[in-house]
Amino acid sequence: MNAVVFGGSGFIGSHTVEQLVLAGYRVTAAVREQSDSTFLDSLGVNVVRVDFSDPSSIAAAIRGHELVYNCTADAKLHTVIDTEAEVEVKLTRRLIEAAASQGAERFVQLSTIVMYDFRTGDPIDESYVTVPEYPIQALAVKREEVVRQAGREAGIGTILLRPASTIGVRDLSSFFSRLYQAHVHDQYPVIGDGSGRVSLIDTRDIGRAMAWLGSLDMNGQADNAYLLKGFDTTWGGLKAELDRAAGKAAATIRIPENPTEEQLAQLHLTPFAIKSFTVNRLWNDGKIRQQGFAPRYSLADAVDAAVRDLIRRNGNRS
């Protein structure tokens, strides 16, 4: 089967491409003109440069592919959020419309657990109704609405994957790479007592799930959303794994659970970040597991692979 991945040069997108190749798909990676395709080239996949603002360029990249994956993303926690964002909203709609026009059978969207609010510390499943408190949460909800609506209007089946926060190789800017840099410099942040619980996942398992969803029997359903995690831990437990993998117990910076605005500014933290570390962020992914998908990698597997990769790329010896 033929699959095209938009955003394939990104962190999670590259793992999606890699796992599709390992699963036997014929893969095209559709990337922007300026994107670094070194890893994609090493996989031997077809890399095409696409003008994401041009529907005809997008359609040409999709033509001949049964599966279309969207791993593009632009919004970040520290940026100004526009709920009509060019990438999250407009490009997503453009991709779905092009996929349908070219006869693709399925559109798989990489979504995000950022959409979920902080009203509960209990495990959340797909039935939970989120009430966005922050603009980035509202944008994540809006993107899913666009996927569903555009899919229905265009007549193409859509699937949404909401993976837990991830640890893996080729990470340039995620939470883990920032924690690693803090660890290297003996400034590892611990908010409260570090007992907040969190669901995480090895990025290889996200790629595996994306490939698995490409062949999932949708049983006639127009759309589907799936949460996905690999394992649960605490923020203190994650530090212990980082200490082990890096070969040293890094010094910490203690941050109060309810910092003042002045403290937030000094630490370059946002209220969203503080809540992410203090409110349990646990996901119940029983739905995807009951349908047959099983994550493969443990917390230790993920941390070991990511730390080795960060040391290799950054030359840091902690």
Image (spheres, rainbow, N blue to C red):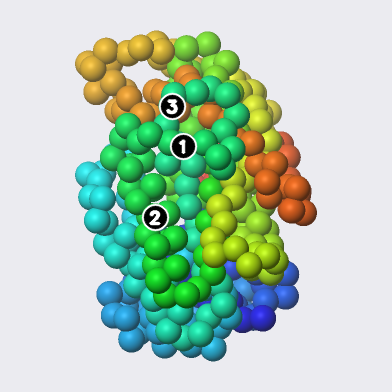
Dot placed on the residue nearer the N-terminal end, 1 or 2: 1
Q: CA distance from mark 2 to mark 3?
A: 21 Å
Q: Secondary structure at mark 1?
A: loop
Give the camera-side residue of 145 and 261. Answer: 145
- The spot of residue 123 in percent (x, y) is 60, 29
Q: CA distance from mark 1 to mark 2?
A: 13 Å
CB contact under 8 Å: marks 1 and 2: no
Task: Tell me if residue 160 comes above or below residue 318 in the rendering.
Answer: below
Dot placed on the residue nearer the N-terminal end, 3 or 1: 3
Q: Nearer the viewer, mark 3 or mark 1?
A: 1
Q: Secondary structure at mark 3?
A: loop
Q: Amino acid at mark 2?
A: Glu
Residue ID at (52%, 11%): 193
Mark 1 closeness class: few <14, some 14–19, many ≥20 residues within 10 Å: few
- Checking the image for residue 118, the label placed there is 3
Please count the marks in the image: 3
Query: Is residue 32 at all visible to an observer of this figure?
Result: no
Residue ID at (53%, 80%): 104
| Residue at the disc numbered 1 | 129
Q: Amino acid at mark 1?
A: Val
- The spot of residue 219 in percent (x, y) is 68, 65
Task: Tell me if residue 313 comes above or below residue 108 in the rendering.
Answer: above
Dot placed on the residue nearer the N-terminal end, 2 or 3: 3
Task: Tell me if residue 5 comes above or below residue 159 in the rendering.
Answer: below
Residue ID at (27%, 62%): 86
For residue 117, side relative to residue 75 (left or right): right
Mark 2 closeness class: few <14, some 14–19, many ≥20 residues within 10 Å: few
- Checking the image for residue 145, the label placed there is 2
Q: Amino acid at mark 3?
A: Phe
